[in-house]
Amino acid sequence: MPPFARTPLNRNPVHRTLRKHPSLFGIPFVVIIVGASFAMQSFTQTRYDLHDQKVSQLSKEQELGLAKSRKKFDIREEYFRLSAAQEEDWEPKRIERPKGLPEWGVPPPEPPTKPDKP
């Protein structure tokens, strides 16, 4: 009689199926992840609803106080105010050119000349 039996100890059909199809091992993991996603949906929705309610709450006193202290805004007035402030402080000044460079930048390159055909 040999020291070890030739028949395996586990003759469970689940073990045999997993040995034949090892990809079935990941199915419980996927089921748990998808199930947890659906289970946590209500908690997540409650969290966002409470945050939205907290941010959007504004009492009538605060709302009336904001309306009284609001300044009328006119885009033309703002434009003229900003342009007047810039004109006072702004002065055009040319940048010094490097040595050897003409005053108005790099001269355009001359087009290549075509050799005459004899």
Image (cartoon, rainbow, N blue to C red):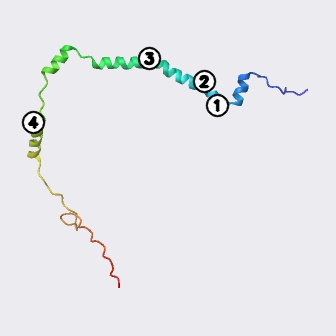
Measured as percent of width and height from the top left, residue 112 is found at 31, 73
Which of marks 3 and 4 precedes in the sequence? 3
- Is tag 4's residue or tag 1's residue first in the polypeptide sequence? 1
Q: What's the residue at 10%, 42% (across, down)?
A: 85
Q: Secondary structure at mark 1?
A: helix
In the image, residue 95 above or below residue 13: below
Give the residue at mark 4: 77
* Residue occupying image coordinates x 27% and y 16%: 57
Foreground pick, 62 / 4: 62
Q: CA distance from mark 4 to mark 2?
A: 67 Å
Secondary structure state at the residue bearing disc 2: helix
Instruction: Name the spot of residue 30 as percent of width and height, x first.
Output: 57, 26
Seen in the picture, residue 85 relative to 7 is either above or below; the reply is below
Tell me the amino acid under the disc marked 1: Ser
State how far apart marks 4 and 3 are (Cα): 51 Å
Instruction: Using the image as rendered, state which of residue 89 and residue 77 is in the foreground.
Output: 77
Q: Residues within 10 Å of mark 2 (few under 14, many from 20)?
A: few
Identify the residue at the far bottom of this view. 118
Task: Give amino acid for label 4.
Answer: Glu
Q: Earlier in the sequence, mark 1 or mark 3?
A: 1
Q: At numbered mark 3, what does the secondary structure look like: helix, strand or loop?
A: helix
Task: Determine which residue is flagged by label 3.
Answer: 42
Q: Secondary structure at mark 4?
A: helix
